């Protein structure tokens, strides 16, 4: 059974293998690229290695513990949380518009995050001009991981 979360809610993950779907639709006139960006962040709040930044152009860590697969109107992410380096304290996910055609996140419809078998929520675009937003944080908590629904 999947929980329906609201942005701002969180839950402890009871598994180390997580598959996320970030889904959206856009109109035929939408010309820019919608990208999911993932940052593996250390305790100091920064990225330790170049490979800790995952995007459409570099879709996996070298050990493939984070794997991003862009889809037509969304993305799928597979995580092996038990394989994430010990110095990583947070995995931050953002959704961004890339391009110079003037498109914004408010043009996306049916924006939804689904964590397979665990939870789902609909991130809210706060401003019609927004071109980027944080959608998920997954943070170390004690010996496990906690998911924060953002947006």
Image: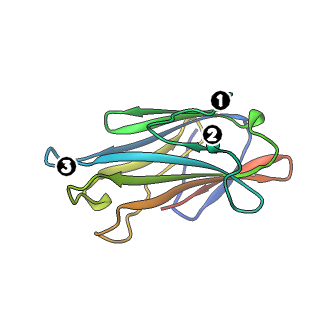
Mark carried by residue 39:
none
Mark carried by residue 51:
2
Q: Earlier in the sequence, mark 1 or mark 3?
A: 3
Residue farthest to the front, as pictured:
50
Instruction: Give the answer, above or below, for where 108 lies relative to 128.
Output: above
The spot of residue 81 in percent (x, y) is: 72, 37
Instruction: Give the answer, above or below, for where 85 lies relative to 102.
Output: above
Q: Dot 1 lies on which element?
A: loop
- Report which residue position mark 3 lands on: 30
Q: Earlier in the sequence, mark 3 or mark 2?
A: 3
Residue farthest to the top, as pictured:
63
Assess disc 3: are there few (<14), some (14-19) or many (≥20) residues with their C-alpha within 10 Å of its C-alpha.
some
Q: Dot 3 lies on which element?
A: loop
Residues at marks 2 and 1 touching, judged by CB atoms closer than 8 Å = yes
Write the residue at 77% across / 59% down. 43
Q: Is residue 96 left or right of residue 136?
A: left
The spot of residue 103 in percent (x, y) is: 24, 57
Write the residue at 64% across / 58% down. 10
Write the residue at 57% across / 65% down. 8
Q: Is residue 104 left or right of residue 36?
A: left
Write the residue at 13% across / 48% down. 29
Front tag of 1 and 3: 1
Assess disc 1: are there few (<14), some (14-19) or many (≥20) residues with their C-alpha within 10 Å of its C-alpha.
few
Spatial CA span between label 3 and label 2: 30 Å
Front tag of 3 and 2: 2
- Report which residue position mark 1 lands on: 62
Assess disc 2: are there few (<14), some (14-19) or many (≥20) residues with their C-alpha within 10 Å of its C-alpha.
some
Q: From the image, which quarter does the N terminus lie in? A: top right
Q: Earlier in the sequence, mark 2 or mark 1?
A: 2
Spatial CA span between label 1 and label 3: 33 Å
The spot of residue 100 in percent (x, y) is: 24, 56
């Amino acid at each position: 059974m999947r929980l329906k979360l609201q942005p701002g809610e969180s839950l402890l993950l009871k598994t180390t293998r997580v598959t996320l779907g970030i889904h959206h639709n856009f109109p035929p006139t939408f010309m820019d690229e919608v990208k999911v960006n993932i940052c593996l962040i250390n305790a100091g709040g920064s990225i330790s290695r170049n490979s800790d930044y995952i995007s459409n152009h570099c879709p996996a860590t070298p050990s493939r513990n984070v794997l991003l697969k862009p889809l037509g109107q969304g993305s799928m992410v597979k995580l092996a949380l038990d394989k994430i380096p010990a110095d990583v304290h947070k995995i931050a996910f953002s959704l961004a518009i890339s391009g110079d055609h003037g498109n914004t996140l408010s043009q996306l419809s049916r924006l939804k995050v689904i964590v397979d078998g665990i939870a789902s929520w609909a991130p809210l675009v706060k401003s019609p001009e927004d071109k980027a937003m944080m959608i998920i944080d997954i943070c170390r908590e004690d010996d496990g991981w906690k998911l924060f629904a953002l947006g």
